[in-house]
Image (spheres, helix red, strand yellow):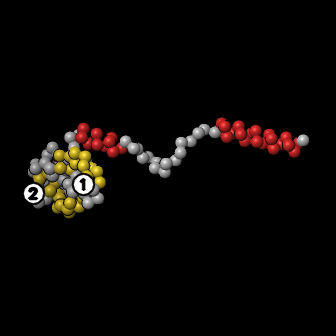
Amino acid sequence: MIRLLIPALLMLVMSCQILDAPEKEPDSGLQGFSPDAEQTQRTACEGRGGSFTKAGISGGLICIETTGDGGKHCTNGSQCEGLCLARSNSCSPIKPLFGCHDIITDNGGKATICID
């Protein structure tokens, strides 16, 4: 009889642990993924006056924004919302500015930057 009682008690204890265990949501494998992320980004972009569109070589969605100082004379990058373009010494009209461009850096040096 003890042989039957011990397995029965073990099963009872194990079933209580299983019943008391918190339910877990199934793991989708996409931690941090939000199905509403694209719409959230689009809304935020358009709220800033930007255009949420495909751009660059990859064709990924990105927010293209018009800068408030586009065309303004600049002598270093810190004077612009976007980039200070070396060719014209003026602030870029949009950000990000895709392609390769000679720019004036924040410390007044010159560099070539390529953005895809």
Residue 56 lies left or right of residue 74; in this view the side is right
Instruction: Identify the image quadrant of residue 104.
Output: bottom left
- Does residue 7 show up? yes
Q: Which residue is mark 1?
A: 55
Residue 67 sits above or below residue 58 on the image: above
Left or right of 105 on screen, residue 35: right
Q: Is the residue 99 above or below the residue 38 in the image?
A: below
Q: Which residue is mark 2?
A: 88
The residue lying at 9 percent from left, 57 percent from top is 88
Q: Quadrant of the N terminus?
A: top right
Could you tell me how far apart the alpha carbons at marks 1 and 2 are, in whole angstroms? 24 Å
User: In the visual, does 15 lie left or right of 64?
Assistant: right
- Tell me if I can see residue 78 in this picture: no
Q: Quadrant of the C terminus?
A: bottom left
Where in the figure is residue 12, as x and y percent of width and height?
76, 38
First along the sequence among labels 1 and 2: 1
Q: Picture coordinates of residue 23 (x, y %)? A: 58, 39
Residue located at (85% from left, 43% from top):
4
**Of residues 60 and 102, the one drawn nearer to the viewer in this rendering:** 60
**Element type where label 1 sits in the image:** strand
> Where, by quadrant of the figure, is residue 103 drawn?
bottom left
The amino acid marked with disc number 1 is: Ala
Amino acid type indicated by mark 2: Ser
Other-residue count near label 2 (Cα within 10 Å), few / some / many at <14 / 14–19 / ≥20:
some
Tally of numbered discs: 2
Image position, residue 55 (x, y; %): 24, 54
Quadrant position of residue 35: top left
**Dot 2 lies on which element?**
loop
